Image (tube, rainbow, N blue to C red):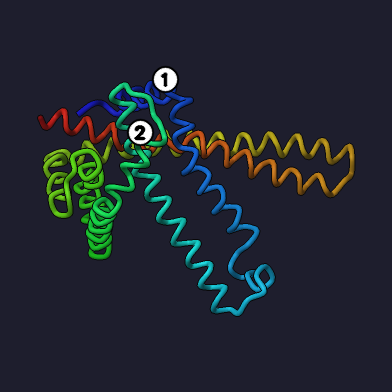
Amino acid sequence: MTHPAALIKNIWAKYSGDFKPLMIASLPFALAITVANVLGIFFPLSRAEAVLPLPKAATIAIYAVVLAAYIIFSFASSIALYLNAGRVFENQKAEIKEPYRKSVQIFLSVLLVSVLRTLITLGGLLLLIVPGIVWGIRYMFAEQAAIFEGKRGREALSRSRELTDGKIFSLFVDIVALLIVLVGAVVVISWAVSLAIYILGSIVYSLSGSETVGLIITYITYAAILVIRYLALILPFLAIVALYRDSKENHA
């Protein structure tokens, strides 16, 4: 297995080398997440009656349809992002049309694999924490086997077991290292930007004395954090594909 530091370096090289096409390709997914966040804050179900002058049952049905559409679109977008991550590691440019077209074609087969993997992992977590972690790692490449190798159902699960056989601990170390770097970087940068905006806003407020400034600071901070999360959006997909490719190369 490749050393975690080498994996992180490889992921960053691919990210920085194809930054613009990756960002453009991830726009639909980022837009869906942003809209969901905004709607969740300003139009929660608890305020639905004030927003929609409809019977409660009809309002709940509308929210349910919107939520289902968001989940379906997000899942299809995640498949497209994995496909684009694969393209980048093959030294091809990320794009929107072809990955999204293919994501629609394989949507149901990948969804089935994802559901099976999730149920197995949850089952392990309900029994004991450790089996859940082990099974989660053992089947972590099931979706990738479905997306990149065309495996279906139990075949994808078997393929993941095959790729992770004897590598549970090393993959665990890789995952922890990647999480610390990727999530930690996003959190630290988000806090740094939020603090900078807050300090700047406090200075402006002390000079102007306007309460509106506080509201503006809140919106600017939230928008800045969304932008940071968007910029980091593709990194987890690149990380999983990098681990998957590394496992395939070492298994061959």
Q: Position of residue 157 (x, y in %)?
A: 16, 50
Task: Give neighbour class at mark 1: few <14, some 14-19, many 20+ (Cα, 10 Å).
Answer: few
Which residue is found at the position 25% from the left and 61% from the top?
119
Q: Residue furthest right?
A: 208
Q: Which amino acid does the dot numbered 1 rest on?
A: Gly
**Circle on res. 17:** 1
User: Is there any visible trace of residue 129 in the rendered image?
Assistant: no
Could you tell whether 196 is left or right of 73 in the image? right
Helix, strand or loop for disc 1 = helix
**Residue assigned mark 2:** 84
Q: Position of residue 26 (x, y in %)?
A: 45, 37
Pick the front one: 85 or 141: 85
Could you tell whether 114 is left or right of 188 in the image? left
Total labels: the figure holds: 2
Could you tell whether 142 is left or right of 9 in the image? left
Q: Position of residue 71 (x, y in %)?
A: 42, 56
Which residue is found at the position 34% from the left and 26% from the top?
88
In the image, residue 52 sits, relative to residue 223, either above or below, namely below
Q: Quadrant of residue 236?
A: top left
